[in-house]
Amino acid sequence: MDIQPSEQGPGPNPELRQVRHKIDGQGVPAPALFVPRQPVVSGRAREPRWPLRLAIMFGVVTILCAGVGAILLHIYDNATRPDRTTPAIAVQNYLFQALQANDDTAAAKYSCSAASVSAITKFRDDAVAAAKAREDEAGFTWTLGTVQTTGNGGIAAVELERDTTNHGKLIAASTTEWSFDLRDGGDGWRVCGARQVG
């Protein structure tokens, strides 16, 4: 059997030979060209998180403001709510508003809707007018006596003192006895009647 010589010349296989370029007359390997590869990001692009953070901050601030507002409203309500918890307190608060503050609107918060208290308001108005005619001032103090209750009704005894002053100097004083009718209407005690008894 005849063996045909290979058509390839001496040396390594041309397919395996390293390609060389001549630079300045010498054969050197061609420099490899370095191309940076871009990072591959899989999936959708990440969206900025600031809208979510802003929404969370807004929600927290809203909750805090609502809580503080509720607390302040509760404090204000307790501070301005008429105290009618007991018959004695209701009478004391009514007399303060009707005689010392001379505020019938505020006094109405401590009296029944159809209260018969014209006697005490007339007593106050007459005393103030008489003192003013002499360029004096009228003032009132009182002492709460016994308070008797039966069911949702009650009667309070009050000793009322009328003072007349001029430039802060007491020039006259008188004492009268009063009886106040009280009733608990479910929202606290109220003054429903006033009459002079002595």
Image (tube, helix red, strand yellow):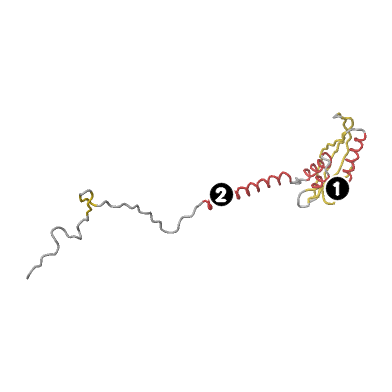
Q: Quadrant of the C terminus?
A: top right
Q: Quadrant of the N terminus?
A: bottom left
The three-letter amino acid code for the residue at tag 1 is Gly
The three-letter amino acid code for the residue at tag 2 is Met
Residue drawn where x is 81% and y is 43% of the image: 94
Q: Is residue 133 left or right of residue 15?
A: right
Residue bearing the label numbered 2: 57
Residue bearing the label numbered 1: 193
Q: Is residue 156 left or right of residue 60?
A: right
Residue 183 position within the rendered picture, expressed as x and y whole percent measured from the top left: 80, 50
The furthest residue to the front: 25
Residue drawn where x is 22% and y is 48% of the image: 24
Task: Please rate how many residues cluster around mark 1, counting C-alpha atoms within 10 Å: few if below 14, some from 14 to 19, many from 20.
Answer: many
- Which of discs 2 and 1 lies nearer the camera? The answer is 2
The residue closer to the viewer here, 119 or 68, is 68
The residue closer to the viewer here, 10 or 124, is 10
